[in-house]
Image: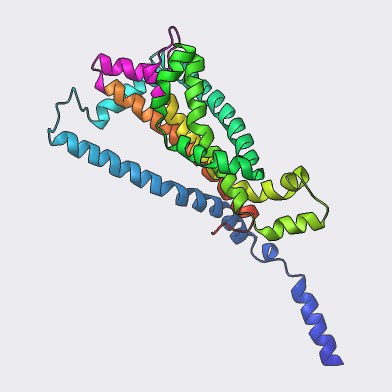
Amino acid sequence: MGDDATATGGTADLAVVDPVAVDPAGTARRSVGTPLRSVWRATWPKLLAITLFITAWQLVVLTGWRPPYALPGPPTVARELWDLVLVDPKFWPALVTTLRRAAVGFLFAATVGTVLGIAVARSRVLRAGVGSLITGLQTMPSITWFPLAILLFGISETAITFVVVLGAAPSIANGILSGIDHVPPAFTRLGAVLGAGGWRLYRYVVLPAALPSYVAGLNQGWAFAWRSLMAGELLVIVASRPSVGSRLSFSQEFGNAPQLIAYMLVILVVGMLADTAFTASARRMRSRRGLASD
């Protein structure tokens, strides 16, 4: 009995030991260091890739493969980019116009793609008739839609939005369709047992289970939307509405290579930031489902 009491008392003593009370400084250091390490792990590969890219670019310039007026070096382009951001009064209005077009087009594409994907997933007739058509539309280069868009809507914002939607919606539809197809049958059976049927089953069981594939489809849809928008702004230049694509076209026409490459870098950075946002959302989603790795 005495031994049991001693053992019980020892266990109770061990149960109330607080690691923070034992080593508060070490715990605080770990709590601060862990986010910093996570940020560094996510940042250093990108910094390394940028460094290698700039180094390779400078080496190509040093070989004299093209004259400096056609292929300027990183320092020249960096100065031009600095002037665009801080001095050029047309840069920010152009960037705002482009981002607004991208947001509007992507919003319409996400709406159309989501509704179409769910409808095709629910109907065998639609899947048989439209399923392959969605994939066919996804493979079509967005630039091939512009002659029709200009014929239908003229040189206007609507023509650009029309092509952005057609470029992005099929990818989003395929994303949610793939996610629904890969929902385990046990999920739907369990939902039916619990009383969910019809749209309630989709609302509370199928769509949440398909969410990772849907986010991947949104990411791919954004990539197609951004590419379609850049092609549209190069071809459809709306009067009195400067945009990144139109400024890029003007730089090429006037032979301003530093400005042209600077705008190309802006397009690249916007695309990378959007991809980072989608990747972070997907990572948080996997973490909530216990699928994220340290």
Camera-nearest residue between 63 and 216: 216
Quadrant of the frame with the C terminus: bottom right
State the residue at coordinates (46%, 34%).
224
Rendering coords of residue 106 (x, y %): 54, 29
State the residue at coordinates (56%, 30%).
109
Is residue 57 rendered to the left or right of residue 82?
A: left
Rendering coords of residue 276 (x, y %): 49, 41
State the residue at coordinates (46%, 38%).
136
State the residue at coordinates (31%, 15%).
250
Camera-nearest residue between 226 and 173: 173
Look at the image and say whether residue 256 sits in the magenta stretch.
Answer: yes
In the rendered image of this protein, does residue 253 appear above or below residue 135? above
Name the quadrant containing residue 217: top right
In the rendered image of this protein, does residue 148 appear above or below residue 207? above
**Residue 141 appears in the picture as rendered:** yes
Look at the image and say whether residue 98 sits in the magenta stretch.
Answer: no
Rendering coords of residue 62 (x, y %): 15, 35
Q: Residue furthest right?
A: 1
Quadrant of the frame with the N terminus: bottom right
Is residue 124 rendered to the left or right of residue 34?
A: right
Counting the numbered discs, the total is 0
> Which stretch did the figure color magenta?
231-257
Q: Residue furthest top?
A: 240
Rendering coords of residue 157 (x, y %): 50, 15
In the rendered image of this protein, does residue 171 appear above or below residue 267? below
Camera-nearest residue between 114 and 100: 114
Q: Residue furthest left?
A: 64
